[in-house]
Image (cartoon, rainbow, N blue to C red):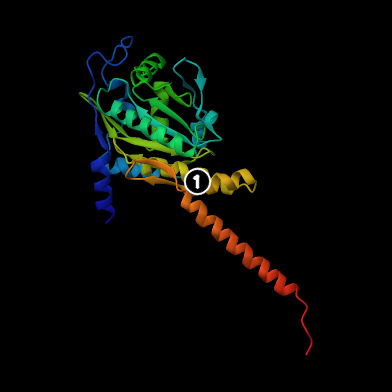
């Protein structure tokens, strides 16, 4: 049964990439794939999926992964530790791809838009990391972001040193294999919780919105549950009432759930008051 599930997931998760001749960034000469071959152990796809699943629950602080220096599109240094405090979505891409990476990035943009509308504009962050080094440098990543028309201030496109690619990708359970035309790898999005621990993996170039928004919603509900202030209680109730509408293809607040919760709380409150009054009522001696 487990093998059948893995095989089914692979059918939707495997993305076969091909390198474009001129590349997406005219200022970068796209060379052969050999510079990153050391980071790709060429595992079987079943092993790749298992490695991806095994990463769930892994803290990024382990082995110093959260402290690895990356560079944003402006060539400013950042680390994954800088994103702690809110959920983080991580996507691995390479800028020389002309098919799967753009498709996945555009689908991610749709998912991000839907998630921000449902969960809040500032509720989570996103990073896309270029793994084909040294070609996916800050200039190339910035050009890719512009070509994809990504202007979200909470979404950054990052580069890292070629020597750090194996450590970072392995920590996320992301496997890739160099081919004559580019790379083969799982189309994978990783959801990291506010504390820097890998919480979920999302697979496929055209994933369903609930597969992406659901883990973010669960993480935010968990954060709200840890606090007892009125704002957190209200946030948790609102998250509970935010549901996916398959007909409209987006999320909406189901106000009928608000009514059901209100009625339930009212009835429960009434029962508590009745019981308290009954206990306080003086007993008549017979």
Q: Is residue 95 visible from the viewing direction of this image? A: yes
Looking at the rendering, which quadrant does residue 169 occupy?
A: top left
**Residue at figure coordinates x 28%, y 33% from the top left:** 185
**Residue at figure coordinates x 51%, y 51% from the top left:** 258
Which is nearer the eye, 68 or 185?
Answer: 185
Question: Relative to 163, is 227 on the left or the right?
Answer: right
Q: Where's the N terminus, which quadrant?
A: bottom left
Looking at the rendering, which quadrant does residue 167 occupy?
A: top left
Residue 119: x and y, percent?
A: 48, 39
Q: Where's the C terminus, which quadrant?
A: bottom right
Which is nearer the eye, 189 or 46?
Answer: 189
Residue 181: x and y, percent?
A: 21, 23
Height in image: 138 above or below 182? above
Q: Residues within 10 Å of mark 1 (few under 14, many from 20)?
A: some
Q: Is residue 56 visible from the viewing direction of this image? A: no
Which residue matches tag 1? Answer: 239
Judged from the image, the secondary structure of the residue bearing numbered disc 1 is helix
Residue 53: x and y, percent?
A: 37, 44
Height in image: 164 above or below 202? above
Residue 49: x and y, percent?
A: 31, 42
Residue found at the far top of this picture = 27
Looking at the rendering, which quadrant does residue 180 occupy?
A: top left
Which is nearer the eye, 278 or 215?
Answer: 278
Height in image: 23 above or below 183? above
């Amino acid at each position: 049964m487990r093998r059948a599930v893995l095989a089914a997931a692979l059918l939707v998760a495997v993305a076969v990439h091909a390198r474009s001749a001129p590349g997406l960034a005219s200022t970068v000469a796209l060379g052969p794939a050999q510079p990153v071959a050391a980071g790709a152990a060429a595992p079987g796809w079943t092993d790749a999926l298992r490695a991806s699943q095994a990463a769930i629950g892994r803290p990024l602080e382990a082995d110093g992964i959260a402290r690895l220096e990356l560079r944003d599109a402006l060539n400013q240094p950042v680390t994954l530790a800088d994103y702690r405090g809110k959920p983080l979505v991580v996507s691995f891409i390479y800028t020389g791809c002309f098919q799967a990476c753009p498709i996945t990035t555009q689908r991610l943009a749709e998912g991000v838009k839907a998630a921000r509308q449902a969960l809040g504009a500032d509720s989570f962050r996103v990073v896309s990391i270029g793994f084909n080094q040294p070609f996916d440098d800050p200039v190339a990543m910035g050009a890719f972001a512009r070509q994809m028309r990504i202007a979200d201030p909470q979404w950054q496109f990052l580069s890292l040193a070629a020597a750090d690619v194996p450590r970072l990708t392995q920590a996320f359970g992301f496997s890739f294999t160099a081919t004559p035309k580019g790379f083969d790898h799982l189309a994978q999005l990783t959801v990291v919780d506010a504390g820097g621990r890998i919480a979920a993996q999302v697979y496929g170039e055209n994933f369903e919105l609930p597969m992406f928004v659901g883990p973010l919603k669960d993480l935010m509900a968990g954060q709200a549950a840890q606090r007892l202030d009125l704002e957190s209680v209200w946030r948790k109730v609102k998250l509970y009432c935010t549901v996916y509408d398959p007909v409209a293809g987006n999320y909406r607040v189901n106000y009928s759930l608000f009514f059901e919760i209100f009625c339930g709380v009212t009835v429960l409150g009434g029962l508590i008051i009745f019981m308290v009054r009954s206990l306080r009522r003086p007993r008549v001696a017979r």
